[in-house]
Amino acid sequence: MPSYAEITGWGKCMPPAVMTNDDMASVIDTSDEWIRTRSGIRERRVSHVPGSDLASVAGFRALAAAGASAEEVDLLVVATCTPDTVIPSTAAHVQKKMGAVNAAVFDLNAGCSGFIYALAVATAMLRSGGYRKALVIGAERITWFLNWSLRDTAVLFGDGAGAVVIEPSERESGLLASHLGCEGDALEALLVPNFGTAGNRFVEDYATFDVMFDGREIFRRAVKGMAKEVRIVMEELGLENSDIDLIIPHQANERIIQSLANHLGVPMEQVALNIGSYGNTSAATIPVALCEALEEGRIRPGSNVLLAAFGAGLTRGAGLIRWGERTIPLGESDAELPPCDQTALEIMSEAIKRTG
């Protein structure tokens, strides 16, 4: 059985329609300053297509970077809390769109911690010897859920997808250690009620989603929860803060990220930060930030990359990636989203009219 599961490909897909804070302020009681000072967000992307389209394009780009084809993939895991359909899984839609006909597929819902959970699961499955090439995708279309009468949540989220390919390796690389957890006693702090079999589908406006969001409670638990998981992973590997080359945290709130860095005694220069451009894309934030760190040359062969996340559940997780020898894609994919001829506000116009 292989000892490790190395990341050999990576790719992201961000929808083209941009919604700025000023766009938000034109239809909701808020302002650019209010949003930026509380979250660090300047703009976010709004998808005109289902989440499986975002996932598929990101997946094709990751495969091209690995020099692999969709037919070679034998494990496809999609981390998402905004599935195309409940039955079948989003991963099944992605398999069909990509032609990954030889892959076992499933979705994994751990909220914003989803990508770390999915990477840990896929890594374990490869290291067991049963699979040879896994495609792990974090993809979300959260704007579809937004209730525009709820200012505290409507301004925070955006859409996007990121993906990695992992393959068995005898080189000490890939996800070397991870630790996952959940604080289910506080699950009401981030909850979309009446969506699922526990809800009442015959109530009026069943398709309007009221996101329950306790920002103060999430902030308090997120910093402590992520720091706890990070310490467990670091202790398992015998690493110190000075051994970490880059931290890629979940991009939920700039103040949470700064608090985490302070808690760990790490300078912000050592932390990936892109929330200003994309908002919170849930399970997509970490793989998208990982792709951008590679594009910017912030990850080098042998780099120690620390992941940390906290999300609905309330889930939490951390992982340490030892990067392999290659940071340059082997190829590029020509996969693209269908053309978009609408602005972000136009895409969301019906939701704004119904819930704003």
Image (cartoon, helix red, strand yellow):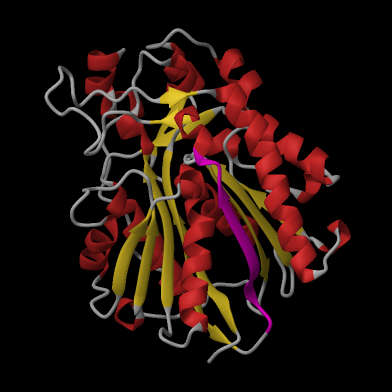
Residue 114 rendering spot, x and y as whole percentages? 47, 52
Is residue 173 a member of the stretch shown in magenta? Answer: yes
Q: Residue at x 18, y 24 (%)?
A: 206
Describe residue 155's horizontal placement relative to residue 85 as left or right: right
Between residue 63 and residue 199, name the one nearer to us: 199
Residue 4's x, y, as percent? 60, 82
- Percent across and percent down for residue 148 are 35, 17
Magenta span of residues: 172-184
**Camera-side residue: 65 or 322?**
322
Q: Is residue 334 magenta?
A: no
Residue 291, picture quadrant: bottom right
150 lies above or below 246: above
Res. 332 in view = no
Q: What residue lies at 30% left-to-right and 74% top-to-bottom? A: 104
Residue drawn at x 60%, y 72% is 328
Q: Residue furthest front?
A: 185
